[in-house]
């Protein structure tokens, strides 16, 4: 009976926001969840989103069910945004695209396909990775193991470890890769390193599975942030790409994203798509329409599309400027001679500070800075005005 059910632990990321709300200190900072904030630390709705919503109201669009695979106009533009509109893959109809419940739901749908059609195959995930990856594969009953990624000594990429772990995995494994702005470390491979990663994956007949939650948010350019995926696709490999519009369009609560599976032929893509639909139907029947319409209106309208790019550059630019200011403040305040340059080398919303669990707890308990216990801070939740305060907290936590 229900009485025997035990209490589940709070989510390590979303639980941080709950603790933050309960704190009344005036300098408190929520650097837990990766959500963009303005310089006043308020949530931000993009102007292009408001404009797209106005267009939707003017057109008096209805609320009929979408097909299982989602809004056709959305599926078209989302694949084009990822692979490039002129990519031969698109003309050849080799991409099976299905609208998903944002990045998480798209990953979960792909995991269900892996469990059903690649029974026993495992997926390699980076150590560390976004906390929910393990939950997703566990719940879908897809076995996983980790490949080395982060090197605590350099606060950089353990490239040799990564390559040797990918080599050591059984042939035909899935390899989960963060397309850009690796979460939680903010450390991405260089273009040369991506080529070598692709070499090994091809040699081993592995299947690359890209998680792209930050397209446009890492470099500020949509194309540049898709370059890892496009590099693999250009080699003619079969691959998966999960997309999310939570961050780059600020559509967190709309739950809009997609799963794209690049197949060897249009015929295979049609079959794969039919199976994705078959998996989606008993789980949630069909996806929500609002976010899909926003994305298709923004991406499909040249004027709004350009405005979106400007707004994204503004958001990515604000994050870069607080990153720089945090670095400058750390250098000014820390007299120990520690090299903080890793902060500047990292990209995207997050910075991996290298603070351990006890130090991260000091950040929260003494300084009211809320963050995940792995030492990750979301720079999207930091204002320029609070950089010095944060630097004091980090320096104190490091040395005590
Ligand atoms: N993958 C990664 C690496 C992420 O950081 C996130 C968001 N935190 C997601 C996927 C999915 O987020 P959402 O479900 O909101 O799209």
Image (cartoon, helix red, strand yellow):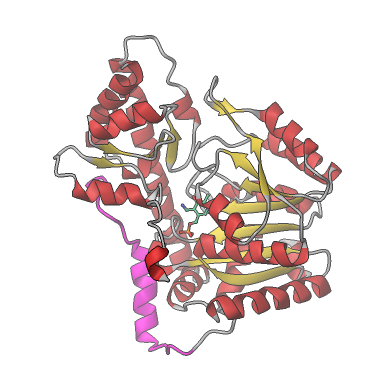
Q: Is residue 54 magenta?
A: yes
Q: Quadrant of the N terminus?
A: bottom left
Q: Which residue is drawn at the image coordinates 67% and 73% (left, top)?
A: 276
Is 302 situated above or below 141? Answer: below
Horizontal side of 350 relative to 235 (left or right) equals left
Q: Which residue is drawn at the image coordinates 78% and 44% (left, top)?
A: 201
Residues 347 and 88: in front is 347
Q: Quadrant of the C terminus?
A: top left
Horizontal side of 192 relative to 253 (left or right) equals right
Q: Is residue 253 magenta?
A: no
Of all residues shown, which one is farthest toward the top?
336
Residues 213 and 395: in front is 395
Q: Where residue 302 appears, x then y in whole percent?
A: 50, 67
Q: Where residue 191 appears, x then y in whole percent?
A: 67, 37
Q: Which picture quadrant has residue 392?
A: top left
The stretch in magenta equals 36-64
Residues 79 and 369: in front is 369
């Amino acid at each position: 009976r229900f009485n025997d059910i035990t209490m589940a632990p709070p989510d390590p990321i979303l639980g941080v926001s709950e603790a933050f709300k309960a704190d009344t200190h005036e300098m408190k900072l929520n650097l837990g969840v990766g959500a963009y904030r303005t310089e006043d630390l308020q949530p931000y709705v993009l102007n292009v989103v408001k404009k797209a919503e106005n267009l939707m109201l003017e057109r008096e669009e209805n609320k009929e069910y979408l097909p299982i695979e989602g809004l056709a106009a959305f599926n078209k533009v989302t694949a084009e945004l990822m692979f490039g509109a002129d990519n031969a893959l698109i003309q050849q109809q080799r991409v099976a695209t299905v609208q998903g419940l944002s990045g998480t739901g798209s990953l979960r749908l792909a995991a269900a396909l892996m469990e059903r059609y690649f029974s026993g195959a495992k997926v390699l995930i980076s150590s560390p990775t976004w906390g929910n990856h393990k939950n997703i594969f566990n719940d879908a009953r897809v076995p996983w193991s980790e490949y080395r990624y982060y090197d605590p000594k350099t606060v950089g990429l353990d490239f040799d470890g990564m390559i040797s772990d990918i080599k050591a995995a059984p042939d035909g494994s899935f390899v989960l890769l963060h397309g850009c702005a690796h979460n939680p470390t903010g450390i991405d491979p260089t273009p040369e390193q991506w080529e070598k990663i692709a070499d090994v994956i091809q040699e081993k007949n592995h299947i690359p599975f890209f998680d792209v939650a930050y397209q446009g948010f890492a470099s500020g350019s949509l194309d540049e942030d898709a370059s890892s995926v496009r590099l693999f696709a250009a080699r003619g490999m079969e691959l998966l790409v999960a997309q999310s519009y939570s961050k780059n369009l600020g559509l967190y609560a709309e739950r809009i994203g997609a799963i794209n599976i690049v197949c060897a032929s249009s015929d295979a893509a049609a079959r794969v798509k039919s199976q994705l639909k078959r998996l989606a139907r008993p789980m949630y029947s069909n996806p929500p329409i609002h976010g899909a319409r926003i994305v298709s209106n923004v991406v499909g309208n040249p004027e709004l599309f350009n405005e979106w790019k400007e707004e994204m550059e503004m958001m990515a630019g604000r994050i870069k400027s607080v990153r720089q200011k945090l670095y400058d403040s750390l250098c000014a305040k820390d007299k120990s001679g520690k090299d903080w340059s890793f902060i500047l080398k990292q990209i995207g919303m997050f910075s991996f500070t290298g603070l351990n669990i006890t130090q991260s707890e000091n950040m929260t308990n003494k300084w009211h800075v809320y963050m995940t216990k792995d030492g990750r801070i979301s720079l999207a939740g930091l204002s320029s005005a609070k950089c010095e305060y944060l630097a004091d907290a980090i320096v104190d936590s490091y040395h005590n």
